[in-house]
């Protein structure tokens, strides 16, 4: 399993709209092949910062399957205009439990 980690800096003041849009976008990502689970968490110290954690079966399920899909275009339309700067996305694999 691969963990996608994205730090999302939302434009200040747009947090409620972002969270509403993310609720819609959650249905998109959760329907993708290779998707396992996800969490969106909000930073306590910086309330306009979120972290998105997505578990995928393989790296390719995210980088090729999801990002190469038509559903990703809808995801982008819903969410990408909220970010400043654009998120950094990294992928992790379990080393120890």
Image: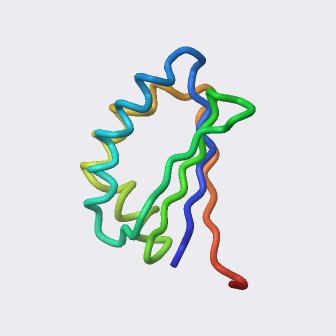
**x%, y% of residue 56?**
45, 70
Q: Nearer the viewer, residue 64 or 5?
A: 5
User: Is residue 21 shown above or below 16?
Assistant: below
User: Is residue 27 shown above or below 66?
Assistant: above
Q: Is 58 placed left or right of 93 in the picture?
A: left
**x%, y% of residue 20?**
36, 30
**Residue plotted at (29% across, 69% down):** 33
User: Is residue 16 shown above or below 63?
Assistant: above
**Residue plotted at (40% across, 23% down):** 17
Q: Give the color scheme: rainbow, by chain, secondary structure or one colour.
A: rainbow
Q: Nearer the viewer, residue 12 or 33?
A: 12
Q: Nearer the viewer, residue 46 or 6?
A: 46
**x%, y% of residue 57?**
43, 77
**x%, y% of residue 50?**
59, 39
Q: Quadrant of residue 41?
A: top right
Question: In this figure, what is the number of numbered marks?
Answer: 0
Q: Is 27 placed left or right of 9 in the picture?
A: left
**Residue plotted at (59% across, 49% down):** 6
**Residue plotted at (71% across, 30% down):** 46
Q: Residue furthest front?
A: 44
User: Is residue 5 shown above or below 72?
Assistant: below
Q: Quadrant of residue 16?
A: top left
Q: Residue furthest top?
A: 13
Quadrant containing the C terminus in the rendered view: bottom right
């Amino acid at each position: 399993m691969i963990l996608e980690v994205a730090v999302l800096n939302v434009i200040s003041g747009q947090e409620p709209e972002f969270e509403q849009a993310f609720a819609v976008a959650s249905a998109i990502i959760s329907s993708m092949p290779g998707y396992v689970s996800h969490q969106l968490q909000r930073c306590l110290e910086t309330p306009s910062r979120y972290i998105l954690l997505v578990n995928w079966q393989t790296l390719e399920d995210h980088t090729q399957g999801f990002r190469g899909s038509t559903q990703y275009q809808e995801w982008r339309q819903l969410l990408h205009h909220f970010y400043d700067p654009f998120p950094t996305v990294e992928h992790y694999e379990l080393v120890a439990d």
